[in-house]
Image (cartoon, rainbow, N blue to C red):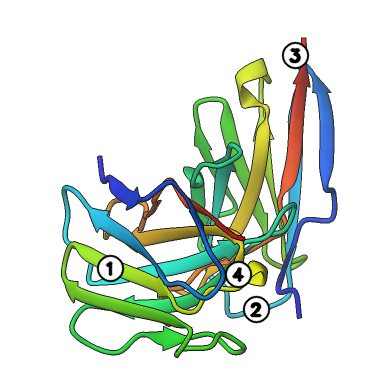
Amino acid sequence: DQQVKQNSPSLSVQEGRISILNCDYTNSMFDYFLWYKKYPAEGPTFLISISSIKDKNEDGRFTVFLNKSAKHLSLHIVPSQPGDSAVYFCAASVIQGAQKLVFGQGTRLTINP
Amino acid sequence: GAVVSQHPSRVICKSGTSVKIECRSLDFQATTMFWYRQFPKQSLMLMATSNEGSKATYEQGVEKDKFLINHASLTLSTLTVTSAHPEDSSFYICSAEHAGANYGYTFGSGTRLTVV
């Protein structure tokens, strides 16, 4: 049972344009969501997070939107830069629970010059 | 910021031998650490939750006798893959939780295990 889903395995975006990565979840108990960036043979690097009491969180070029009713979140990167090319994972957790993260399958983002 | 050091980054071992992977929190204390494995082009799958001073909690389907976890101090957790087989070849990643402003989980750099 895949509780966190990233249905797009890959995404290609022109440099300078907006990259939008999507993530859906099924477990309504999740109340904290995170996005990670991962390069090959490296551990994930934290990008941005959002708790369920918010619907938007912004940090520089990165903005995460949360739609609780649709159980959907998205990561917007604008403007996209070549260094943003990586695999992006969304993850979810229940703050009051075991606090373990459940990851989506990842989306490989390629920024074309 | 919080740093998690994972060692070794790459290991090749013979089938039937055991391999130990270390995960250290360098500048903070980690009561809880997590161990993940990632197969090529797949998600990170949680294997177990490691709690300092107590037994690890394993996810369903993960053999606790094969993947031994020890969390003897607040800065060190180890994962030992015992009697490794080629199907254990994978990318293993640890993470530690720290109660920072973003409830961060800091990840180690991962260990590529190849069993031949």
Q: Where, quadrant-wise, is the C terminus of chain B in this rendering?
A: bottom right
Question: Residue A32, position in %: x, y?
Answer: 51, 64
The residue under the point 62% across, 88% down is B61
**What separation in Å lies between label 4 and label 2 (alpha carbons)?**
33 Å
Tell me which numbered mark, 2 or 3, is placed earlier along the sequence: 3
| In this picture, residue A52 sits left or right of residue B20 | right
Tell which subunit mark 1 falls on: B
Label 4 vs label 3: CA separation?
Answer: 39 Å
> On the rendered structure, is A23 left or right of A61?
right
Q: What residue is shown with label 2? A: A28
**Label 3: how many residues lie within 10 Å, few (<14), some (14-19) or many (20+)?**
some
- Residue lying furthest top in this view? A113
Marks 2 and 3, Cα distance to the nearest angstrom? 36 Å
Of badges 4 and 2, the one in the foreground is 4
Q: Position of residue B45 (x, y in %)?
A: 60, 68
Q: Residue beneath label 3, please?
A: A15
The amino acid at mark 3 is Glu
Give coordinates of residue A9: x percent, y percent.
Answer: 83, 48
